[in-house]
Image (cartoon, rainbow, N blue to C red):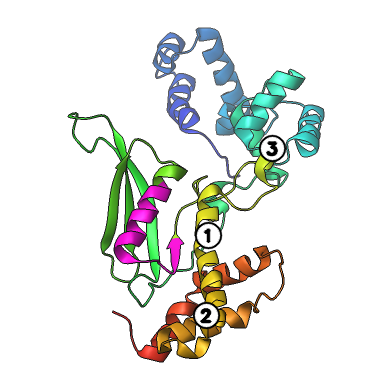
Amino acid sequence: MLVTMSDKEIHRLPVIQAVCEKRLRRRDAASQLGISERQAQRLINRYRVSGAEGLVSRKRGQPSNRRLTESLKMRVLTLIRENYSDFGPTLAAEKLRERHNIRLSIETVRNWMTSDGLWVPHARRKSRVYQPRHRRDCLGELIQIDGSHHDWFEGRAPKCCLLVFIDDATGRLMHLRFSESETAFDYMLATREYIEQHGKPVSLYSDKHAIFRVSGPENRNTTVTQFGRVLYDLAIELICAAQAADFKGADKLGKGTKAVYDLVRREVSFMETDRAIYKDMNKIFKVLKDGEFVEAVEKAVGKLA
């Protein structure tokens, strides 16, 4: 018969055998094993009756006396499923303690949630696949903008933020500006300085900072930030320029300007009567963002520098 024993039980076996064969006194055996003489005598008696199998702990395979009840487990899982289904184990254990006076370890809550399918350990989750973004073809087609907070002057001046404009196609640093913090006003000033020096970019590429992206449920009634409104104003200039060309005669335009005019007129019709132009702004802004103006001009006059 195969008997599974722990290292501790295997260590006890030769000592108990030596006592039974009268090669070792019970007192010495108890001292070697670190147990009392009464416990040593119990092991000797069990060995004489059942052999090596008698030294195996009788608690093996039995539920622990400290085991949590199944009813408590079901109650906890029901509470989590109904109230905290989108919580992680740490926060769920905290809410159970605060609101329901149920004190459980985080590991216990994690194991229960995992077994019930309410939580997937990070090791089992599928890794996210990120689609690589290829660089643009032309200088000025896409400008990456970001701010970096750092002690740029190494203690000789207060810490500040460096606003950076980098061309996506070439990786060139196009414009830099130091500011006290990363605000919409500073980005507006930096953008104006960039445009005065290099002209309008087709599009800007930013992170999800609140300057560029509407965040917070209280602000979801609008989709445009203050900085976004400035960029829309640049699109308005193209609409106004096309309207002026119609009055002066579009046939007098140069090749590149005519290509831009035709593209604007493809999206926005001549304004014969007063109308709300926010739809026109959105159309031109999308064309600007997609880089169609640069493509049209290059098709008419050749590759831009």
The residue carrying mark 1 is 233
- Name the mark nearer the viewer: 2 or 3: 2
Of residues 34 and 256, the one drawn nearer to the viewer in this rendering: 256
Asked whether residue 249 is in view, the answer is yes
Q: Which residue is mark 3?
A: 112
For residue 258, above or below residue 113:
below
Q: Earlier in the sequence, mark 3 or mark 1?
A: 3
Q: Quadrant location of residue 23?
A: top left
In which quadrant of the rendered image does the N terminus lie? top right
Residue 194 within the segment the image draws in magenta: yes
What residue is at 43 percent from the left and 79 percent from the top? Answer: 294
Determine whether 274 is above or below 89 in the image.
below
Using the numbered discs, state the Cα–Cα distance from disc 2 to disc 3 in whole angstroms: 71 Å
Mark 3, secondary structure of its residue: helix
Which amino acid type is marked by label 2? Answer: Ala
The reply, left or right, for residue 104 in relation to residue 289 is: right
Quarter of the image holding residue 247? bottom right
Residue type, mark 1 in image: Asp
Q: Amino acid at mark 3?
A: Trp
Q: State whether the magenta stretch is mostly helix, strand or loop.
A: helix
Magenta region, residue range? 187-204
Mark 2 vs 1: CB contact within 8 A: no
Question: Is 112 on the left-hand or right-hand side of 57?
Answer: right
Describe the element under mark 1 as helix, strand or loop.
helix
Residue 131 in magenta stretch: no
Give the secondary structure at mark 2.
helix
- Neighbours of disc 3 within 10 Å: few (<14), some (14-19), many (20+): some
Percent of width and height locating residue 74: 80, 33
- Which residue bears the numbered disc 2? 245
* Image point (49%, 79%), residue name: 292
